[in-house]
Amino acid sequence: MRAVVLKAATPVITGSGRAAPTARFFGLALFLLLAACAAPPPPPHIGSFGDFTPPAGQPHYLACPQNYCLATPDIMTALIPVPADRMRGIVRHALETLPQVALVSTDNEGLRLVYREGTANGTSLVTVEIVDAEDGASGLAIYSQSETGDRAADRDVVWRLIDTVTRAATQSGGHRAG
């Protein structure tokens, strides 16, 4: 039986030849891998606003109706005299009109929407929950966490959505189909 000896090829890195592009490629790949490790962690998944606590030390913005969220919100949202099933259609339509928005998922019979919104400072992951309140009213619980940790961008995303939905609900008089 003969032993087979394999020799590892050691490329010589010079400014020309076949090894130089390969070395540049691996250098770029290593740089991208290290950059990915330095990227901020993905925003947390919200199971329920009732027991959700935003991660400490990470910029975010939280808006909730009074006594709805466990965590203290940055702003309280008002209830709107529109039933939750109609509000769902209003929110979906409002998201379709915003530039650079991509719906990621819907949960809880369509009362929870998760979307990504591109901003001048990066991308925010936003969770919107339509709160079914008494007397045919509904509210919005909104959590935004930008992937770049920009609290001002998170605040702007939340305020813009509240303004857009409130305006649409007022104009529709609550009559938009869900």
Image (spheres, rainbow, N blue to C red):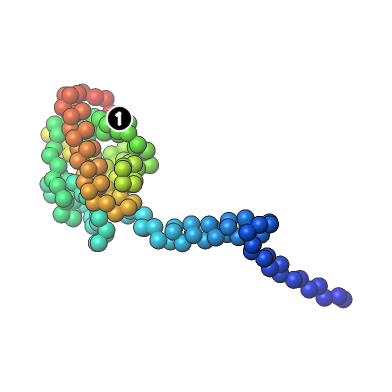
Quick one: SS at disc 1?
A: helix
Rendered image quadrant of residue 59? bottom left
Residue at image mark 1: 97
Kind of residue sitting beneath label 1? Thr
Q: Is residue 166 above or below residue 16?
A: above
| Whole-percent x, y for residue 154 in the image | 25, 47
Q: Is residue 112 visible?
A: yes
Q: Is residue 153 above or below residue 6?
A: above
The residue at the point 86 percent across, 75 percent down is 2
The residue at the point 14 percent across, 34 percent down is 80
Rendered image quadrant of residue 18? bottom right
Rendered image quadrant of residue 105? top left
Q: Dot 1: few (<14), some (14–19), or many (≥20) neighbours within 10 Å?
A: few
Q: Quadrant of the N terminus?
A: bottom right
| Whole-percent x, y for residue 11 in the image | 68, 65
| Whole-percent x, y for residue 177 in the image | 26, 25
Report the residue that reaches farthest toward the front. 15
